[in-house]
Image (cartoon, helix red, strand yellow):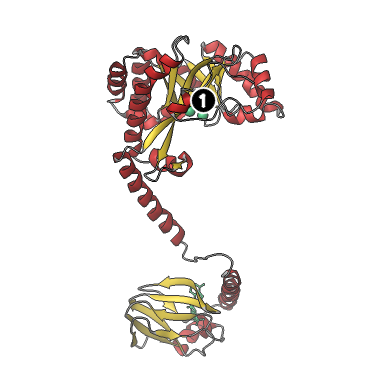
Amino acid sequence: MAIHEKRHRFKQDEIIFKEGDDATCAYLIETGRVLVYLNEEATEVPLRILGEGEVFGEMALIDNNKRSATCKALTDVETIIVTREQLLDRIHESDPIVQLLMRVLLERLRSQNERIRSRASEVPFNLDPLAFEKEEAVKRIGLESRIAIALDNDEFIPFYQPIYDLATGEIRGCEALIRWISSDNNVIPPSVFMDVIEESTLILRAGRVMIEKCTADLPKMQTRFGHVEDFFVSVNVSGRQFLDPRLVSHLDECRIKANVPARQIKLELTERVMTEGPQALATLQECRKQGYMLAIDDFGTGFSSLQYLAQMPLTDLKIDRSFISKMCEDKKSLSIIRSLIHLADLLGLKLIAEGIENAEQLVMLNGLKVQMGQGFLFSKAVPLNEFMKLPLKFNT
Ligand code: CMP
Ligand code: CA
Ligand code: CA
């Protein structure tokens, strides 16, 4: 059945029809864009933007009802008119079940529109299924470029969280944690930017900055905590950094400049590094050969594979905070910790517990002979100047 080619043009911003109007035809968009929206009091509740090749105004014809929404030309729009007869003839020719289905679907769409209308005052709503993703993508690109600028402006610095010997209470080292100090002096938490950094090549730049700064700070810390043998700074290194062939030479360069031995620098890595392939493993081995300490971080949270663990040239194992936080109430967490301790023992690794928040956990970890730990019970991560004022021993 040929469609009689009747066209209609609408000027930009022209209202094509209004919600509640009687319907005479539907439209097929040839060029331009049409906004479909509901009028709710003084506001417009957008439902959808339609473009080339899409049809609108069909609903009122099919269910013989009033226009379910208002349609407005967002640009100059060219349409082909589809008459009521053209549409209904086709529908009547179709299978009765298909006709029924169509009515059901239309009813659902109308009631969904009503729900959207009633929620419009509560939440900003966007029905374009891609809109959310588009918005996220745009936000992300924006954040990425702000991070790149912030790196140029030297706005990323390490904060340091002390790590203590749990038995003697003496400080042993610290973990360097990245912080973004924005130009207006706000501390932006890693939760805002870390994913974006880690999923882009920005991680290479940010990683280098962290290595440079914490190696440069290490001699000052060593002076402050002079009696501590091999006071260490532990820096998080992501899988991607281990694929960078310059990683080891950069580490060497930084520590030679700061005049600190490799054994005072600990690299924290996750099991994910093993999914980066043999190159990453080769870099790990090179790091270890040069004397850097290697701690496996967040162990037990990912897709831990003991096979990986055996292959990696590790020196330390960090017990993830999730096990520590539950160890006092949850027998399973405690069992996992026990088996990690056993594993570390077999593999000759030192243990560091992270996320220690209360004395009960400390007592238990001490009982389990976990050597080192960090957490809010002792101190959060602080800037260097505050770190230098920390006591030599924790007091609880
Ligand atoms: P009709 O009810 O004739 O007039 C308004 C038109 O807007 C409707 O036909 C559909 O073409 C379109 N429409 C209504 N609700 C929606 C929606 N939720 N999503 C997309 N288009 C819609
Ligand atoms: Ca870490
Ligand atoms: Ca961790």
The residue where tag 1 is placed is 305
277 or 243: nearer the viewer: 243
Q: Quadrant of the N terminus?
A: bottom left
In the image, residue 312 lies at what x, y percent?
A: 44, 19
| Label 1 Cα neighbours within 10 Å, binned few <14 / some 14-19 / many ≥20 | few
Above or below, 267 against 20 in this view is above
Q: Residue at (68%, 27%) from the top-left corner?
A: 332
Q: Quadrant of the C terminus?
A: top right
Lateral position of residue 153 relative to residue 107, left or right? left
Can residue 280 be seen by looking at this rendering?
yes
Between residues 266 and 47, which one lies in front from this camera angle?
266
Q: Is 97 positioned to the left or the right of 156 in the image?
A: right
Q: Is residue 130 visible?
A: no
**Residue 393 location in percent, x, y?**
56, 16
The front one of 100 and 322 is 322
Does residue 393 lie above or below 33 as drawn? above
Q: Is mark 1 within 8 Å of ligand 3?
A: no
Instruction: Answer above or below: position of 341 versus 33.
Output: above
